[in-house]
Amino acid sequence: MKLNDFYKFFYSKWEKSPEAVADGYSIIMQTPGDLPFFLKIALDVCAKQNSEHLVETIVVPDSQLKRGFTELVKTWSKDYSVSPVRVAKFQPLEMLLNRYHRNPFNNCWHQLIRGIEASRTNYCLLHDVDLFLLEPDLLKKHYESCVEKQVACMGVSEVWDPWFKENGVDHIVATWELMFDVNWAKSFEPWEHRAHYELALGELHSFDMMLWTQYQTQPNRITRHEKEWGFVHFNHVTSTYRRFQQHKAPYEDSYFRLLLMRLLINAYDPSDWAYDIPSLEYLCQGVTDPSHRVTYLQEETRLHYPEFRTKLQQLIESPILDDQQATTLSQGITAFDRVYGYAKNQFVPFGALISAA
């Protein structure tokens, strides 16, 4: 049996909800089970949101769930006053499948399915753990707009895949911070939300998670805000880390996502969790040493620094960080700022910087 056929067979029906459905929405937090600092960040960020209409928060750790993660959920959720927190875990077979195939996108889909089936509300919000909500009323307004417009999906960003716009399909929205009607999601078979290939407009195209189901939905049932507002999103951080885990050294951190993870661990995580992410000092050495496990040597990497650094500065200057967190990030990035000339806003050719180092 092919893998796609397997999923079509075993994920053709939804489990029946054991409880009555409530008005309002649930937050589905898709958290890496071996990276609890993302859990800490997600709880901290969402706790600063206006909690009107929020019924509960569902934490869904992925297949890399490590011992001690659930205990941290219990500990950190004590300070999370905006809603009750529940953990929805993978089924045993799902744990095995994802650990064997090591596909971060499949992992994410299983988190989506577990979150939807655990939900007890009419709507769900799919929260990205590398997205920081800066506007305190964003989720409240997001939900109210979705209900007022009576749409199935309300997004905050355009879909990342240019194929849709190139082919005149302009109603598809990105899945981060997607507010969606649970009845709409369950009107499709669970496997249809999975990232997979489908024949569309005369060609075989790869549809990311929830994009095939959006594609099949009437355009007037999907919308998004006119412009992005109220958040900073770093994108693809967890999937980058999964590639790093599978990659033989050296690994070029071309979008500075591993650096971001280390900075955030230092700023947010008070636990003694053992992370497989090099220290800040070690990462700094990768600017000049090609033998290091993580490097920053390519010209392409230099070109990506301004965008990364701009987002990081937005976060540093935002009101959602306390003084200690902001200081930790500001001081932690100083060495890289010197290398890339950020303080003077001069991004000289990377080769010249290496020669001068």
Image: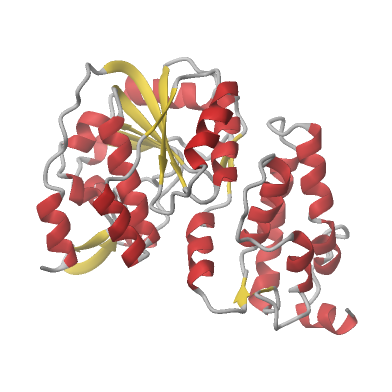
Residue extending farthest to the front is 67
On the image, the x and y values in percent for residue 11 come to 16, 48
The front one of 341 and 70 is: 70
On the image, the x and y values in percent for residue 317 come to 76, 38
**Residue 278 horizontal side relative to residue 218, left or right:** right
Determine which quarter of the picture holds residue 281.
bottom right
The front one of 192 and 142 is: 192
Q: Quadrant of the N terminus?
A: bottom left
Q: Quadrant of the C terminus?
A: bottom right
The front one of 342 and 322 is: 322
The structure residue drawn at horizontal position 15% and vertical position 44%, both measured from the top left corner, is: 189
- Residue 23 in view (yes/no): yes
On the image, the x and y values in percent for residue 143 come to 41, 24
Determine which quarter of the picture holds residue 267.
top right
The structure residue drawn at horizontal position 78% and vertical position 72%, both measured from the top left corner, is: 285
| Above or below, 261 relative to 87 | below
Way the structure is coloured: secondary structure
The structure residue drawn at horizontal position 48% and vertical position 26%, both measured from the top left corner, is: 139
Q: How many marks overall?
A: 0
| Above or below, 165 relative to 57 | below
- Residue 170 in view (yes/no): no
**Residue 56 horizontal side relative to residue 228, left or right:** left
The structure residue drawn at horizontal position 13% and vertical position 51%, both measured from the top left corner, is: 10
| Above or below, 83 relative to 98 | above
**Residue 357 horizontal side relative to residue 19, left or right:** right
